[in-house]
Each structure stands twice: as C-alpha cells, then as structure tokens.
Amino acid sequence: MICVSALVVNVDNTILNVALPTLVRKLHATSSGLQWIVDSYAMVFAGLLLVGGSLADRFGRRRFFFIGLTLFGGASTGAGFSGSVRFLVAWRAVMGIGAALTIPASLSIINDVFRDPTERARAIGAWAGTIGLGIAIGPIAGGLLLARFWWGSVFLVNVPIVVAGFVGALMLVPDSKNAVTGQPDPAGALLSVAGLGLLLWAIIEAPTEGWASGEVIGVGLASFVVLLAFVVSEARSRHPMLRLELFSDRRFSAAAGCESFATFGLLGALFVQTQFLQFDLGYSPLQAGLRILPIAMVLVVSAPLSPVVARLIGIKHTVAAGLAAIAGGLWQVSSVCSVATTYGDVLPGMLLLGLGAGLLLPTATNSVVGAVPQGDSGVGSASNAVALQVGGALGVAVFGSVLSTRYQDRMNVALAGRHVPVVAMHTILGSLGGALAVADRAGGATGALLARVARAAFMSGNKVALAVGGAVALVGALLALVGLPSQISRSSPGAAPATDALHRRPGP
C-alpha cells in the first residue's frame, strides 16, 4: 500500500505531459503556462517536504500519511474540473501539499519497519523503483485516459487509487513517531517555497520578458537572496527542518545532488519529448504515451538489478553510470533533432534514459536515507524527495525556457517584415501548438509555410534544450565519481531512540 501511494503521487509528475498539447487547445495555455502547470506541483511539493517529514516524525507517520492522501485526492478532484490555466495551477499546488505530507511519511514508515540494513535496502529499492516507475508510466496512463475521456480524467484517476491506499494502510501499516524530535519550522518552509518559486518564475518567464530585462534579473537575484536567507535560518534555528550537518556526510550530500541532476534530465526530457511526439510527429496522446513506454520498460528491469550492480562495482560507479547513461541519451536525441526526425531516431536515447534512471534512483535513495539516524527517518526521506522534486522542477523550467527562447528567436526572424496581427503573433510565439492552430486557420500555402517554419523552430529549440540537459547530467556523473564513497556502510544508519521504539504501535 505504501508503494501504491508513492506510485500515484509520482505518476502525477509526468501523467500530465501527454495532456499538455490538449491543454494548449482546450485552455489556450502558452509554453510558460504549461511549465507552471507542471512546476506548481513540484515547487510546493519540494518546498513543504521537509516540514512534512518533521511533522510525521513528531506527531505520527501513519497519521500524516492519511492526511496527505486525503488532501491529494481532494485536490485531484478540483484539478480535474478546472476551467482555466490559473485554477489548474492553483489546484496543482494544493496537490503538492498533499504529496509533501504523503511521501516522507511513506518512506519513514519503511525505514522504521525494516530495521535490518539488508532488508531496508531491498524495501527502499522497491519503493524507489516504484517512484521511478511512476515517473515513467505517467505518459502511457495519461494517453490511455485521454483516448476515452476528457483531459480532467488524468487527475480524477487518482481518487480511487488514493482510497485503496488509504484502506490498505489503515489495515496493514503500523504507526510510529519520534516524540523528542524538534518543533516544526514554518519560517524555513516559507523561505524555501518563496526562494524556489522566485527562481522558477525567473527561468520560466525569461523568454517572454527577456533574459536581460530588469524584472527577470531582479526576481532572479531575489530568489538567491531568499534561498541564502533559508540557509542562514536553518543554520541558526534550534529546530531546523533541514539539518545542514547532514551535508557533511558524502553519502547524503553527493547522492542527493546526483538525484537532482538525474531528474533534471529525465523530467525535462519528458516535458519536451511528449510535445515533440504530438505536435511534430502528429501522434495522439495514447500513441505518444505508448512511445514513451520503452523508458518504463527499461527502468522496471534495471531498477531491481541496481543493488546487485552496486555490490559489484560500488555505489559511486553505479550512480555515475546512471547519470552517464542519461547524459548519453539526451545527447543522442539532441543529435538527431530536425524536422525530419522520426520516432526510430530518438528511441535509442529514450532507452538510455530509462537505463540511467533505473540504475541511479534506488542506489542514490539508499545512500541518502542510510546516512540519516533512524529517529529522523521522516526528515531523511523528505530530504531525498526534495532532491528529486527540485531537480525535476528545474529541469522542466530550464528545458522549457531554453526551448522557448530558441523557438521565439527563430520565429521572430522568420516573421520579420510580415504583417501578422498582434493577437496572432502572440499566439504563434506562445507555443508551437498555438502556431499550428493559427496555421490551420490560415490554411493554404500560407498556413503550410507557417506550420513548417514553426516545427523547424521548435525542433531547433528542442535540440539545444536536450544538449543542455546532457551537459548537466554529465556534471552529475563527475560529482558522483568525486563525491560519493564506493560503498554504503553496512551498519545501521542510527539506532532508533528509546522514545521512537516506545511510541511504535501496531495498526488496527
């Protein structure tokens, strides 16, 4: 039940991707609007995860698991019936709150139940594999739903799964807590959400506002000031939600960084590739989802094997190999990007993405969680999930922003000197989907020319975005080689304090 709940929360990172072209047509979303729909969830999820972990440790892990599931299911219903981009972004943010309470509680329950290091590694491997599977199968699930229902179904499908997870956990999952954990840290939560939100705004809105505009530069600088204030606040707080001393352990800091680099490339690539499959190749949402499926298949096979690989070559080389595979996959797809690109051209790179994610996620997760004392397992699991979500949010923002900047530059050059109405020009520059809609209305030779130029501009942006993602993944591989130890200590990451044991009680 814990893994099922983790699956549905993480499916929401990617299930929306195949619906993005539909949202362009139905809700008239621009490229920046699409990025906010995806990233509002990840931003709030990441910003509140550490608070969720500390609350679960203090007041009961199963209790907050239930609260998070309930909130997630209710917000999914609201998102499914949203009538505008603004409302959808808002409901996605509320879903992020529910996810932030559910995920750290779920992993800390696993960490509490499985005290033996070997058993814990297997359980965490299954949990991490489930998360990776959720990320990978989201597009196919979304495609199946959109083939039969309207776009809101990609959110409403969460509700019955949440109910099943709630009932199963009620019957099977024991409760536990650490009564001596510190107080919640609302100031840290506010600063983390504000800092990440400002940074994402600067990256996402830069193509529209201009990278050199005073507003973008000002907001970008403000984000760094707020994030610095967050670090200072955590260092001085008597009860920080993020214990900075954890970063002195390379098992924690280097592995968390590598996870961020990996999801940066993986989620960024899924964001742009699902649009490529539908807008450029003309596939339906279901057809596009099926063509993302190879990533899930390779991930499902490689994730259970990652502990074996880690024992043979060490966690350092396993994580580095995963990031190198992701980098290679992104560069392979980038190298073949053009208006003549076919699905077969990009398939090898997609397979490498799945292999890299499968090798890295369980190994790095076990390293991060294994570096945290048992009594702080909620904070440890939340820290792990923060690394995943921040990397993914920045990946979507950077990939989308690089693509949009290149696309808009190419379109401005192509349309220079032509008398295009202001409203039509705004729609064309807003997204490839908007340009194709204008081309369809124009019809004839003019429409065909506009569609061809827009697709070429999009693929040019796609090429640059994927190349940037590959470079970032390669930096992550180098970080793994330099920063990670060869093996995770086989000793327990920390004995559970007496209070933690005393407050464990069986489920009903």
Image (cartoon, rainbow, N blue to C red):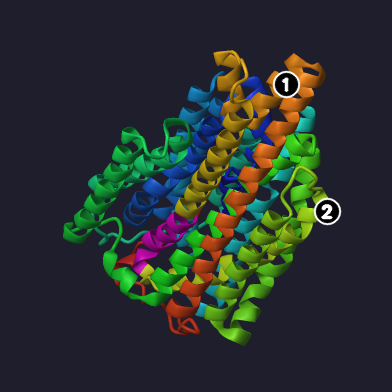
Q: Secondary structure at mark 1?
A: helix
- Between 438 and 452, the one nearer to me in the picture: 452
Q: Residue 386 magenta-drawn?
A: yes
Q: Quadrant of residue 26?
A: top right
Q: Which residues are the magenta region?
A: 375-388
Q: Nearer the viewer, mark 2 or mark 1?
A: 1
Q: Tell me the crowding category of disc 1: few under 14, some 14 to 19, or many 20 or more residues within 10 angstroms, Cα based.
A: many
Three-letter amino acid code at disc 2?
A: Gly
C-alpha gap between disc 2 and disc 1: 27 Å
Three-letter amino acid code at disc 1?
A: Ala
- Between 22 and 141, the one nearer to me in the picture: 22
Residue at left offset 48%, top offset 36%? 207
Q: Which residue is mark 1?
A: 439
Q: Is residue 70 visible?
A: no
Residue 191 at x, y percent in the picture: 27, 45
Q: Quadrant of residue 3?
A: bottom right
Horizontal side of residue 358 vs 198, given as left or right: right
Q: How many marks?
A: 2
Horizontal side of residue 99 vs 442, given as left or right: left
The label shown at residue 344 is 2
Q: Residue 323 magenta-drawn?
A: no
